[in-house]
Amino acid sequence: MEHLSRILYVSRTSQGVGEAELKQILEQSNRHNKEQRISGILCAGGGHFIQVLEGPQEAVFRLYGRILDDRRHYDSLLIGVAPIKQRMFQGWSMGYLSNPPEVMEARRKQLLAMWERRAEADELVVLMRKFLEQLRG
Ligand SMILES: Cc1cc2nc3c(=O)[nH]c(=O)nc-3n(C[C@H](O)[C@H](O)[C@H](O)COP(=O)(O)O)c2cc1C
């Protein structure tokens, strides 16, 4: 059985990255993602990126690693990783949504708040901490 995963991250657009660079990113994405059976959406505006990538786990992680090294953005924060049964963006090798700055600001804030709330409460984090405490003795 194939293991599908989804990741969601936010980042900031680097200085000087405009329409031309965005077009290039989308061209690269469409070419590469189709090959790797990755789907998703890239939202941009007001100096922010929000991206969802979904597909075979290995391909998603390999791509995310490459994207992290891309100088066209910085301050990337991984909001979530989840195993999934079904894609949400089936058929979109990389959808694109351009949003007004205030919409992007609000979405980013909302995602960061989710991340902060979950960071400590997540059951997995608690279990991992217990496990690590056991290891330390
Ligand atoms: C915000 C952002 C999102 C990106 N998303 C993708 C993507 O979904 N797929 C992809 O192949 N490259 C994406 N890239 C570009 C990669 O970092 C990398 O430059 C590209 O995959 C290299 O393609 P090439 O080997 O065809 O030149 C993204 C870059 C940025 C800055």
Image (spheres, grey):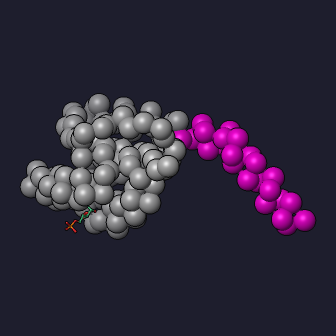
Q: Quadrant of ligand 1?
A: bottom left
The residue shown at (48%, 40%) is 84
The residue shown at (28%, 66%) is 71
Residue furthest to the left in view is: 20
Residue furthest to the front in view is: 1
**For residue 22: magenta?**
no
- Would you place residue 1 above or below residue 32 in this image? above
Picture quadrant where residue 119 is located = top right
Note whether residue 93 is visible: yes
Picture quadrant where residue 35 is located = bottom left
Q: Position of residue 77 (x, y in %)?
A: 45, 52
Relative depth, front residue between 57 and 49: 57
Horizontal placement of 133 versus 60: left or right? right
The residue shown at (40%, 64%) is 62
- Would you place residue 132 above or below residue 93 in this image? below
- Tally of marks: 0
Q: Position of residue 83 (x, y in %)?
A: 52, 44
Horizontal placement of 3 versus 89: left or right? right
**For residue 134: magenta?**
yes
- Magenta span main SS: helix
The residue shown at (76%, 53%) is 129
Which residue range is magenta in the image? 115-137
Note whether residue 51 is visible: no
Q: Position of residue 41 (x, y in %)?
A: 28, 42
Q: Position of residue 49 (x, y in %)?
A: 30, 47
Relative depth, front residue between 109 and 67: 67
- Locate the C terminus by quadrant: bottom right
Relative depth, front residue between 117 and 26: 26
